[in-house]
């Protein structure tokens, strides 16, 4: 059970996930019938990509005593040609002028280690079922 994520409903269009002692709150935008009180689930999915790349970039720099204060990661989303869904996600690691040139390609390689990205590229199997509570 320790690795199970428990999803519960918080009223209105709010849906929460409890996982490893944290509660992750989501809501729908007012256009989607929600209150806009928390990010939509898809926004959290997108944020997981950028923040995962970010921790790899941060760790890379930390291991080499490279300051990270002036590093910024900008993640951009481009639609599929059909206009439905995302066709491309671009991640730009914006480095300060004094970032060591010899590490510019290596920092991209570090960001590419992101586990979230790897799971998207080699997706897991999804298995959905129903059960009756208590049985």
Image (cartoon, helix red, strand yellow):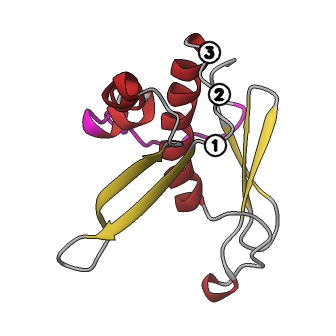
Q: State yes or no: residue 127 in magenta.
A: yes
Q: Residue at x 80, y 35 (%)?
A: 22
The furthest residue to the top:
63
Q: Is residue 98 left or right of residue 37?
A: left
x and y percentages locating residue 47 in the rendered image:
56, 51
Q: Is residue 83 above or below residue 99?
A: below
Cα distance in 3D space between marks 2 and 1:
8 Å
Q: Residues within 10 Å of mark 1 (few under 14, many from 20)?
A: few
Please say if the residues under marks 2 and 1 sit with CB atoms less than 8 Å apart.
Answer: yes
Instruction: Please indicate, yes or no, whether residue 14 appears anywhere in the rendered image.
Output: yes
Q: Residue at x 26, y 32 (%)?
A: 122
Cα distance in 3D space between marks 3 and 2:
6 Å
Q: Residues within 10 Å of mark 2 (few under 14, many from 20)?
A: few
* Residue position marked by numbered label 2 in the rendering: 67
x and y percentages locating residue 6 in the rendered image:
69, 38
* Residue position marked by numbered label 3 in the rendering: 65
């Amino acid at each position: 059970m320790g690795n199970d994520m428990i999803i519960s409903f918080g009223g209105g269009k709010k849906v929460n996930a409890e996982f490893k002692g944290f509660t992750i709150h989501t809501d729908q935008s007012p256009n989607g019938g929600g209150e806009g009180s928390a990010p939509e689930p898809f926004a959290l999915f997108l944020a997981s990509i950028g923040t995962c790349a970010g921790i790899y970039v941060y760790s890379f720099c930390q291991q080499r005593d490279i300051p990270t204060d002036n590093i910024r990661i900008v993640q951009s989303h481009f639609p599929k040609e059909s206009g439905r869904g995302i066709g491309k996600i671009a991640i730009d690691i914006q480095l300060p002028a004094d970032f060591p040139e010899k590490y510019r390609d290596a920092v991209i390689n570090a960001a590419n280690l992101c586990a979230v990205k790897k799971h998207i590229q080699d997706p897991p199997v999804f298995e959905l079922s129903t059960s009756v509570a208590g049985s």
